[in-house]
Image (tube, helix red, strand yellow):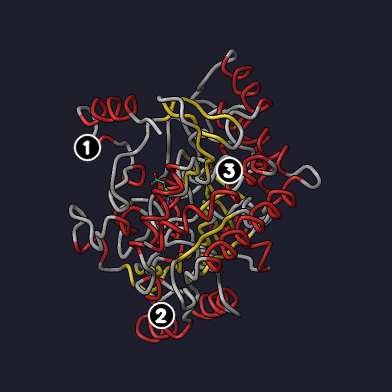
């Protein structure tokens, strides 16, 4: 592949943005090399400024369940843009999207739209503390809930990819009440509650972890969290920014039958435009201003373009058979990954839940952050680059989940499956 134009464009970007990027996960720091520069996206593909085509398994880190530039989503955005792009005032589209969200997520008795998952995370923590009048939080090592100070402790995603266990600029006292437990290990949670349960406001968890590679909840882990928090009078917060609409239409709470007190959403509900949301029990949500004393606000919150993009995306995604077909595509990809690795004698752990998937070059199961240490990152990097050169774009990090869209069935998937042996051959060397 020729990357001349991408190289030039990236040099230019470096003159404007730290590391040439507007979000660290886009840089190829852990896999090496420079990112390609996107010209446009269509269906399951991204096209770069040199005219190269890639089957895209990032899908903007999750939102694009229908693929790039889905016609009815594009049309809905264009139609709304002609009527106004932002009002900073109440409008009906907010309630239209909220009604769809609540139909699929009945635990969100009340909700509020924000502009990103990060905003949802910082707001939900403030609300949990305000409601319970307690200070401490429990989060899990390797989980990432956006980049608000209080949640940047032992975080996943780019923090983990870049090897920054603590983030400079976050005062230690800001995270001193953020307690860290091990995902899939209820004992580690019980221990924290035994020590200071009376002061724990909430447990926050990615029910299926997507920011540390893909980690699947084992046995009764999530049920256990519900039991422990209920007993201690702490809130259970599901961060479904990634899992929402992806592991099931109703998210992990529907898939595993758990009702959290509060939920964070993002990504898919904006159909590729910037959005986030949080919501949950009415008595908790009524603590928010203007009803209550917990302040939270946003100029662009409930943005009309994001509302119509989200509504159109979800209405297509929930049509009979669409999610199920994308889920089957995801399973076929994971089967292909397993078969391809086996053919080359490479140990690989690959899994999917709904339309999220992940894989580790590991011979032993990976169930928590601790287990990821056994994965062969050098092999991942070789695999990543060989696949990229063959026109298949997986996340440029061994610590990120992948995402499949409805557009990947057929040509996109077939193209990928045919090239996996190239990737695994390279991983071996
Ligand atoms: N949750 C996303 C990846 N893990 C965030 C994307 C970003 O940080 O740019």
Residue at 64% across, 28% down: 73
- For disc 1, the marked residue is 18
90 up-or-down from 200: above or below: above
Q: Which mark is first along the chain, 1 or 2? A: 1
Q: Nearer the viewer, residue 141 or 336?
A: 336
- For disc 2, the marked residue is 197
Mark nearer the viewer, 1 or 3 = 1
Mark nearer the viewer, 2 or 1 = 1
Mark seen at residue 268: 3
Residue at 48% across, 45% down: 61
Report the quarter where the C terminus lies. Answer: bottom left
Does residue 286 show up? no
- Which residue appears farthest toward the right when viewing the image? 320
Q: Which mark is first along the chain, 3 or 1? A: 1
Q: Quadrant of residue 354?
A: bottom right
Q: Is residue 338 left or right of residue 155?
A: right
Badge 3 crowding class, 10 Å Cα cut-off, few under 14, some 14 to 19, many 20 or more, is: many
Q: Nearer the viewer, residue 394 or 320?
A: 394
Residue at 55% across, 35% down: 45
78 up-or-down from 239: above or below: above
- Which residue appears farthest toward the top when viewing the image? 82
Badge 1 crowding class, 10 Å Cα cut-off, few under 14, some 14 to 19, many 20 or more, is: few
Q: Which mark is first along the chain, 2 or 3? A: 2
């Amino acid at each position: 592949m020729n990357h001349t134009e991408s190289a030039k464009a990236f040099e230019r970007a470096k003159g404007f943005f730290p590391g040439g990027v507007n979000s660290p996960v886009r840089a190829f720091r852990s896999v090496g090399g420079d990112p390609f520069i996107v010209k446009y996206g269509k269906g399951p593909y991204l096209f770069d400024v040199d005219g190269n085509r890639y089957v895209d398994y990032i899908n903007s880190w999750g939102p694009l369940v229908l693929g790039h530039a889905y016609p009815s989503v594009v049309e809905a955005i264009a139609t709304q843009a002609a009527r106004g792009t932002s009002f900073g005032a109440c409008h009906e589209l907010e309630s239209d999207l909220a009604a769809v969200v609540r139909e699929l997520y009945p635990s969100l008795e009340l909700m509020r739209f924000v502009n990103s998952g990060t905003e949802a995370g910082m707001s939900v923590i403030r609300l949990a503390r305000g409601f319970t009048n307690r200070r401490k939080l429990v989060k899990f090592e390797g989980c990432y809930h956006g980049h608000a100070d209080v949640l940047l402790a032992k975080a996943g995603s780019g923090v983990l990819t870049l090897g920054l266990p603590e983030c400079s600029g976050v005062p230690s006292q800001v995270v001193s009440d953020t307690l860290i437990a091990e995902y899939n290990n209820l004992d580690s949670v019980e221990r924290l509650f035994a020590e200071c349960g009376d002061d724990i406001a909430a447990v926050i968890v990615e029910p299926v972890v997507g920011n540390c590679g893909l980690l699947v909840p084992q046995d009764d882990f999530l049920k256990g969290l519900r039991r422990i928090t209920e007993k201690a009078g702490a809130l259970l917060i599901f961060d479904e920014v990634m899992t929402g609409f992806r592991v099931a239409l109703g998210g992990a709470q529907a898939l595993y039958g758990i009702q959290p007190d509060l939920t964070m959403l993002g990504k898919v509900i904006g159909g590729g435009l910037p959005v986030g949301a949080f919501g949950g029990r009415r008595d908790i949500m009524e603590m928010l201003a203007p009803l209550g004393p917990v302040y939270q606000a946003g100029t662009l919150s409930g943005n009309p373009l994001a509302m119509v993009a989200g509504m159109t995306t979800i209405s297509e995604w929930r049509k009979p058979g669409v999610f199920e077909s994308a889920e089957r595509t995801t399973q076929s990809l994971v089967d292909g990954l397993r078969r391809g690795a086996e053919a080359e004698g490479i140990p690989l752990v690959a899994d999917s839940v709904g339309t999220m998937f992940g894989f580790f070059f590991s011979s032993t199961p990976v169930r928590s952050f601790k287990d990821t240490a056994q994965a062969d990152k050098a092999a991942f990097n070789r695999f990543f680059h060989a696949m990229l050169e063959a026109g298949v774009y997986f996340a440029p990090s061994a610590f990120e989940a992948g995402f499949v869209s409805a557009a990947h069935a057929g040509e996109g998937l077939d193209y990928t499956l045919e090239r996996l042996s190239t990737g695994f051959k390279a991983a071996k060397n």
